[in-house]
Image (cartoon, rainbow, N blue to C red):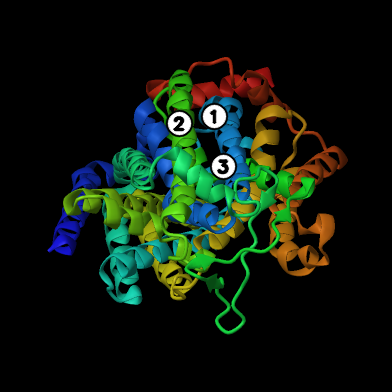
Amino acid sequence: MNNLWVLLAMVVYFAAMLSVGFFYSKRSNSSASQYFAGGRGVGPWLTALSAEASDMSGWLLMGLPGLAYATGIANAGWTAAGLAIGTYANWKLVAKRLRRYSAAAGNAITLPDYFSKRFDDSKNILSTLAAIIIIVFFSVYVGSCFVTVGKLFDTLFGFDYHLMMILGAIIVFAYTVIGGYLSVVATDFIQGLLMFFALIVVFTGTVASAGGIEHVAQVLQSIPGYISGNQTASAVLDQATGLQAVQQGMPVFGQPQTMSAITIISLLAWGLGYFGMPQVLVRFLSIRDADEITQSRIIATTWCVISLACAIAIGLVGRAMLPTQFLSQASAETIFIVLSQMLLPAIVCGVVVSGIFAASMSSSSSYMIIAGSAVAENLFRGLLYRKATDRQVMFVARITMALIFCFGCAVAWDQHSSIFEVVSYAWAGLGAAFGPLVLCSLYWRRTTWQGALAGMISGSIVVLIWPRYIAPLGGMFSIYELLPAFIIALLAIIIVSLATPAPSKHITYIFDHYMDADRTVGDMMLDSAQHHSIEEHA
């Protein structure tokens, strides 16, 4: 009976999300700008919470608690610190400038579009490459979200992982295709609130059920290195099963592993990824007014810090409550679900665990709509068929989303995949390919399109080859691939830009003045008179 109430609450939630998609379908399908960027009319609250919900995904409710449960506070804590710093820095350094520059540079509504228009790339070389990078890494990202969905239903109800993974993926695909960007933002806002509520409720419940903070601390202190800031707990594995060994009803740990400075820097480097995350950057492009970004920054940073802290605490307290429940990191990623079942009334549990599905829906829908817009707007209309109508562009976007849906399901087919590991790879790819370029495009006048191209290519290549060929060398080379890839991409942009002809006067004029104008929805479009004025000054 309890499971029936949980399932009922989740079904109601799913129905509500699909209803939002249908509600926005007419408005979203009125034009490509509405479908891909909401007509640049999104308010500060929706912008902030949708950005955070789409960014964190199921990783926040499953991957991060699972990491904390398996290894202790250090790994998860340093990663969370990097993410919190990165969130604030991205809103502070990038958001307002990107919003204004995207309007000044021809009203760009996608990140690839912004790159081409920022550097006056009439051949759309930059937007084409950016679109390809987005497709590659977002397809992996979508797969990680579908893994979350399958694990959720398998753990809660014992349903077949593969069947539920596909069913959940179909729901996400349906409301994204129907409602476009506005449905994604609106549902992400709801899901951001639900995720926040779920984390607070489960954290509070676990601390109370575990006998209070003092008792939890006492249990965790008995595990070598578990609550140290520079050590990680090291599980002793059973040779027969490959899982953590258990003796006398307690998990067995060996000597803790001391974290080197390289490892800590590596974890903090997760924050660099924000500068290149399309699902966050598109929120900056679509906000109603650049002056509302300060409010959004406060909301987003507060949400991020509290949510990350609760997610880690749930993993730690879960270890004290259920010391031998999960004997691998992949299985530990269901700790949030198990605790919800144990502690909450069935109907509340249904609402809370819907937060996991909410996280996956918000992220995967954002990835789909951004990848679809990149292919349709930047490859199809920008490169292959420049006379394409908005209706044709939106049709191509939907076909693209269908292909990504299929690829994501293929990635998620292995139910033993670690969500944390899958996300870390895609995060590094997008952060290194786009992050250095976004910063240079906004702050360095001398950046050229050739430098931009070199940055995207080098960042992507380093992420692809580092884990397989360089990290195994060990030592300083074992660092998270995002950091070396980010640095190499930044150096490539600088070196190639200095070695190639300086940008045209047209480009430098816009750069020198893009922060002057306070553009609102009504005057964002640069009309022909403005273009002539720019050319005359140049």
Precedes in sequence: disc 3 or disc 1: 3
Q: Tell me the tag on residue 80.
A: 3
What's the residue type where badge 1 is placed? Trp
Label 3: which secondary element: helix
Is residue 483 something that shows in the picture?
yes
Q: Position of residue 79 (x, y in %)?
A: 60, 45
Q: Are marks 2 and 1 in contact (CB under 8 Å)?
A: yes
Q: Position of residue 259 (x, y in %)?
A: 73, 50
Nearest the eye: 146 or 290: 146
Q: Quadrant of the N terminus?
A: bottom left
Q: Tell me the tag on residue 282.
A: none
Nearer to us of marks 2 and 3 is 3
Q: Which residue is mark 2?
A: 300
Residue 368, quarter of picture:
bottom left
Find the residue positioned furthest to the right.
Answer: 499
Label 2: which secondary element: helix
Nearest the eye: 431 or 517: 431
Q: Residue at x 59, y 43 (%)?
A: 77
- Mark 2–mark 1 Cα distance, whole angstroms, equals 9 Å
